[in-house]
Image (spheres, helix red, strand yellow):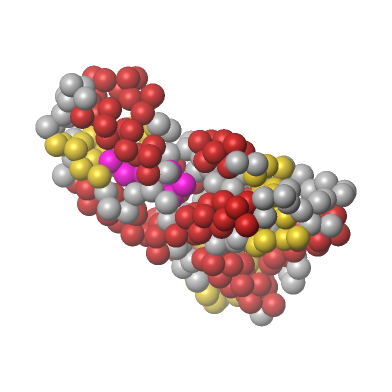
Amino acid sequence: MNSQNIKLAKFAGFCYGVKRAVDTAINLKIENPNKNIYILGELIHNTDVIDELESIGIKTIYEVPEQGDGICIVRSHGESPEVFQKLVKAGFEVVDLTCPDVKKVQQRAVELAKNNYFVVIVGKSNHPEVVAIKANACLYSDNVVVATAVEELKPYEEQIKKHKKAGVVVQTTQMLSTLNLITNYLNSIAKEVLVHNTICQSTAMRQKEAKELAEESDLMIVVGSKKSANTSHLAEILKDCTKTIHIENDSELSEYENFIRNSKEIGITAGASTPQNVINKVINKLKEE
């Protein structure tokens, strides 16, 4: 499976929020070898990393127990204020590793809610980051909705018209095109629309660079979890530019042998939760004859 030219995007793999979360979790275990260390929910959307953390004694839990003992990490996606209270009540020492960019979105959503805007969160309603943003905003307003398409806002059209003021925040890993569609629609029905483009810089740079790489490639390979929002969006964006495949790791390359064999220029990018060693294995396998 050899190809003539394989090029890796510069902005591929861990973003600083994910790197900070993984490094801090590992350091907490090193510094507190005798304490239980838990993470509420998967620290990042990558099974290899979760398994690695498990192997050094950092356990992933999916619900807050009634009684807790040790340290519980809040992951980079953030949590609702209610969950923080539950963790403290259970007796955990809480370490908040919410990504600073995600914290900003939460703060903006709260400001909009406090200032009587009809709050629109552009994002996937079941994504943990979005669940936490909404929970924070809902402390101050009942007028908070989540949408990734104009159709999802249609049921609220009359409400938004009456409200007159709409405020927008965005899940950090969303696509700019999705934000623009929703903003244009809101501009047509509300008197005032205040938009906070809270797509994080890392996501914006990654998407921009990947598109540029796709323009000069016969094939783009996106590496990362299918559960990762930013990785899935990368694949979605690139499919409009050139032939694109989305794989979780090198073991899936064999399914696309024909594509790879017939491509002269191969571009590779990866999601923000994809470890460097997973990316390296994909490159090495492609270079094998």
Q: Is residue 154 visible?
A: no
Query: Is the residue 195 above or below the residue 148 in the image?
Result: below
Give the residue displayed 16% in from the left and 29% down from the top: 3
For residue 28, which quarter of the picture? Answer: bottom right
Give the residue displayed 30% in from the left and 56% down from the top: 208
| Nearer to us in this view, 267 or 117 | 267
- In reply to whether residue 270 is colored magenta, the answer given is yes
- In reply to whether residue 123 is colored magenta, the answer given is no
| Nearer to us in this view, 11 or 107 | 11
Query: Is the residue 90 above or below the residue 192 in the image?
Result: above
Left or right of 141 in this view: 214: left
Q: Is residue 230 visible?
A: yes
Q: Position of residue 205 (x, y in %)?
A: 33, 59
| Nearer to us in this view, 63 or 107 | 63
Q: Position of residue 74 (x, y in %)?
A: 66, 56
Q: Position of residue 200 (x, y in %)?
A: 45, 63
Left or right of 45 in this view: 86: right
Give the residue displayed 52% in from the left and 41% down from the top: 49
Quadrant occupied by the N terminus? top left
Quadrant occupied by the C terminus? top left
The span shown in magenta is: 268-274
| Nearer to us in this view, 147 or 281 | 281
Give the residue displayed 87% in from the left and 48% down from the top: 66
